[in-house]
Image (cartoon, rainbow, N blue to C red):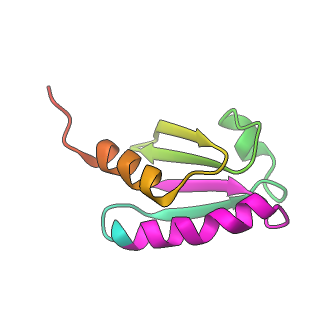
Amino acid sequence: MLVEIGASYLGACQILFPVLEATAVEFQGRIQLMRLDAYRNPSTPRNYGVHSLPTLLYIDKGVVREHITGMVSKQSLIETLTNLLAPQEA
């Protein structure tokens, strides 16, 4: 699951969301995209150690495997997700 923690009134979050939507389409069936408004749910970002917005968390089986703060390009996000979804060597 890819969770975007942001705030609807922040320009960076507004710019990032279309990138996330386009990336989610490319990974359809392999990731789920969730949005969390930090202003409306302040305790959840605190619980995950989020101090800046936007922040992306890739959560797998309840464990945060990747924490990305700030803007990210579609290509960079695709590379990160591809690596995270690749089978892990034993």
Figure quadrant of the C terminus: top left
Q: Is residue 67 left or right of residue 88?
A: right
Q: Is residue 55 above or below residue 1?
A: above
Q: Return the residue nearer the eye: 65 or 71.
A: 71
Q: Is residue 21 above or below residue 76?
A: below
Q: Is residue 8 above or below residue 3?
A: below
Figure quadrant of the N terminus: bottom left
Q: How many marks?
A: 0
Q: Is residue 18 left or right of residue 33?
A: right
Tell me residue 76's x, y (percent): 45, 50
Q: Quadrant of residue 29?
A: bottom left
Tell me residue 50's x, y (percent): 71, 38
Tell me residue 87's x, y (percent): 19, 42
Q: Residue at x 15, y 30 (%)?
A: 89
| Residue 30 within the magenta-colored segment of the rendering | no
Q: Is residue 7 left or right of residue 2?
A: right
Tell me residue 16's x, y (percent): 64, 62
User: Residue lying farthest top?
Assistant: 90
Q: Residue at x 36, y 49 (%)?
A: 79
| Residue 22 within the magenta-colored segment of the rendering | yes
In magenta, the rendered stretch is: 1-25
Q: Return the residue nearer the eye: 18 or 62.
A: 18
Q: Quadrant of residue 13?
A: bottom right
Q: Return the residue nearer the eye: 61 or 67.
A: 67
Examine the residues drawn in magenta and state their main secondary structure: helix
Q: Quadrant of residue 12?
A: bottom right
Q: Residue at x 40, y 74 (%)?
A: 25
Q: Return the residue nearer the eye: 26 or 32.
A: 26
Q: Residue at x 85, y 66 (%)?
A: 9
